[in-house]
Amino acid sequence: MKTRIKIQTEPFDLGPELEELSQGAGALATFAGHVRGDDGTDTLILEHYPGMAEREIARHVDEAARRWPLLGVTVIHRTGELKPGERIVLVAVAAGHRREAFCACEFLMDHLKTTAAFWKQERRGGETRWVETKTSDDDAAARWK
Amino acid sequence: MKLLFFAWVRQKTGKGEEDFALPANVATVGELADHLRARGPGYADAFADLSRLRAAVNQEHASFDAPVNDGDEVAFFPPVTGG
């Protein structure tokens, strides 16, 4: 299985990532998360635990590959300062058929949200605050148990 | 051992990382947090409420009753908010 896990400050293009991943696959499911601007947030600042964040994502990719037959997984997560509309995260899964691609994509995203070592701050009108966890995210991850 | 602090734990302690000699009477993550709380006002604030904190030992999520040893990398941080 092709696995690519990248944590980076630079923006990324979907095209080349998805082209490469989908070679030879019957199905490709993708999730891309963007910075929302509808709540007045003007900047999102992300930090991570280098080493642990990558390991935790890799652990969930391994678990997904045990649950479903997969051909490839790409996870890209940005850190640093991001503006509304910018992509924060990409989870893309290539598989033989749509069901395993959809399921693994959602499984990976739910676990990334609740266990991968990233933290967000929102800056809004000159004030910065740490983003709190949502119980809905914990519930989403718990349903895979 | 190496201590790492992230997000508001880093802000409150004023440090992202430090080398630390593990005291003989500290055997678990929770005891380490109790020890750190007594180191000064910034640490007292950061470690005031353990229910708001999470920990990792050697880059894996760990509970507060997990054992710690000299040579470990121990991190304290708030619940994660990535994605």
Image (tube, rainbow, N blue to C red):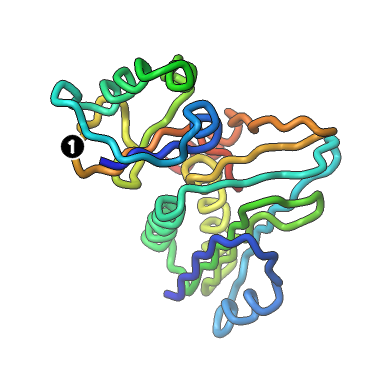
Nearest the viewer among B14 and A6 is B14
Residue B16: x and y in percent read 46, 40
To which quarter of the image does residue B44 belong?
top left
x, y percentage for residue A88? 67, 54
Instruction: Give the labeled residue for mark 1.
Output: B69
* Residue type, numbered disc 1: Asn
Residue for point 29% across, 46% down = B58
Does B82 sit left or right of B34 as displayed? right
Q: Which residue is drawn at 58% across and 62% down?
A: A8
Spot occupied by residue B40 in the image (x, y as percentages of width and height): 41, 18
Q: Give the x, y percent position of residue A57.
A: 45, 55
Q: Above or below — where is A70 with respect to B75? A: below
Q: Quadrant of the N terminus of chain A?
A: bottom left
Neighbour tally class for label 1: few under 14, some 14-19, many 20 plus, Cα within 10 Å: some
Q: Which residue lies furthest to the bottom in this view?
A: A24
**The C terminus of chain A, quarter of image:** top left
Identified at 75% across, 48% down, the residue is: A35
Pointer 1 chain: B
